[in-house]
Amino acid sequence: MAKKTPEPTSPPRERAFLVGVELYGQERLLSLDDSLAELALLCDTAGLEVVGQLTQKLDRPNPQTLIGKGKVEELKALAEETLAQVIVFDDELSPRHQRELEEALGNNLRLLDRTAVILDIFAQHAHTSEGQQQVKLAQYEYYLPRLTGRWTHLARQTGGGGGRAGSVGGVGLRGPGETQLEVDRRTIRREIARIKDDLEKVRAQRQRQRGQRRRNRVPVVTLVGYTNAGKSTLLNRLAGASVYVADELFATLDPTTRRVEFPGGNIVLFTDTVGFIQKLPTTLVAAFRATLEEIADADLLLHVVDISHPNAMNQAEAVHRTLNEIEAGHVPVITVLNKIDRLSDPAAARQIAARFPQAVAISARTGEGLPDLIERIRGVLYETLTPVRVRLPYQQGQLISLFHEFGQVERLEHGRKSVLIEGRLPGRLLAQFHPWQIRPGESDKEEQDVSLVE
């Protein structure tokens, strides 16, 4: 009788011990416990097994080790007791904190922070060349100031193809010496410059594509939201697409665009984007600049909120802050309260909807509420006219024509270099006029040429 071939087994997960710090008077979106619970989910997604946690409340951070010296000793003992291999801090560690903690904890423990874990997840989940380059850039810029003699060749280890959490730089391995470190630093700086140049070309290409879409007058609706809110599931439901969906953080990173025909023949492009999270690393925001510009340039945003999550309101606030950070606060928003099928009382979602402007309660998984959402999108894009005042340079003749063709002109004044138009526009066109919009309290008079005035 033939022997059965043993089934392959996955390697054991590294054991991680979490550390959270709360500073008195510090503004927080999530409580310390909730933030650590989220960090545990991040670690699980990155392939780590959480075996314990330690917290400390401080008036101010210790300039050397972030936590107090007594807590460092307690952490070391707890890590030994739980057989932890990795220590993960919930806040980003400064290069000095990193060095001092590594020295205090010893060579048997690797040290990571929330940013390093998120970067590792992004590296695992980025599949397109652009996505991998963006992640690699963020990794290089994060790890460059943290290079010490305890780090091996970083350039060999930030592949962007995914590895275990903390695969960049192995604490516990002695580096090749200061001379080699300088070589590593120069190599990484060259790589950063090269990747930035490549991504700038991608950015220019995206701008040309957006310009083409505007000329074709096809509105773009971008899905945004906290990670794991259900954006990809909603895109699949709307477009009949088969975008990868998983119940995990940052399941999809690379933007996906699908064409949808609405009742009446209106064509709309829907774009799914990377999920947001509290304490989103600044290196990632910078690296994903070309992708995030898709959000700021959209005609309408669908802000997908997991209404079944206990921290739904705080997650929504984190998304609003990130939208303002990437200068997308001007784009019209419909709030999509998703996952009502998980609520014991779905009617509660409709009550919460009253707190948000333009909110619709749905289940992307079952399709409940989807007709209401589609009707709301159609209304914003094609039916609702929003008051607007703009001063358009005559070089923007296409926009002047667009206003006359699709808007309602209530006031028109021609100046020497530009034209003032006051009236109403459909939502799908508002973003195109944003750079020339006159805001409340601003003068609508044409700026005079200083040389002519003199």
Image (tube, rainbow, N blue to C red):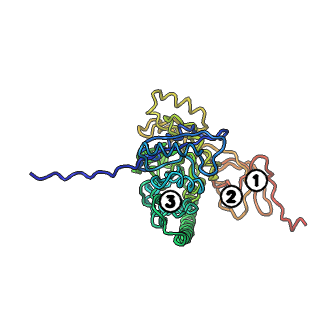
What amino acid type should be assigned to the residue bearing mark 2?
Ile
N-term-proximal mark, 1 vs 3: 3
What amino acid type should be assigned to the residue bearing mark 3?
Val
Secondary structure beneath dot 3 equals helix
Secondary structure beneath dot 1 equals strand
How far apart marks 1 and 3 lie (CA) works out to 48 Å
Count of marks overlaid on the render: 3
State the residue position of label 3.
135
State the residue position of label 2.
400
Q: Residues within 10 Å of mark 1 (few under 14, many from 20)?
A: few
How far apart marks 2 and 1 lie (CA) works out to 11 Å
Q: Position of residue 323 (x, y in %)?
A: 61, 49
Taking the image as shown, residue 105 lies to the left or right of residue 24, namely left
What amino acid type should be assigned to the residue bearing mark 1?
Leu
Question: Viewer-nearest of labels 3 and 2?
Answer: 3
N-term-proximal mark, 3 vs 2: 3
N-term-proximal mark, 2 vs 1: 2
Mark 2 and mark 3 in contact (Cβ < 8 Å)?
A: no
Q: Position of residue 279 (x, y in %)?
A: 57, 48
Residue 412 is tagged as: 1
Up-down relation of residue 213 to residue 280 (above or below):
below
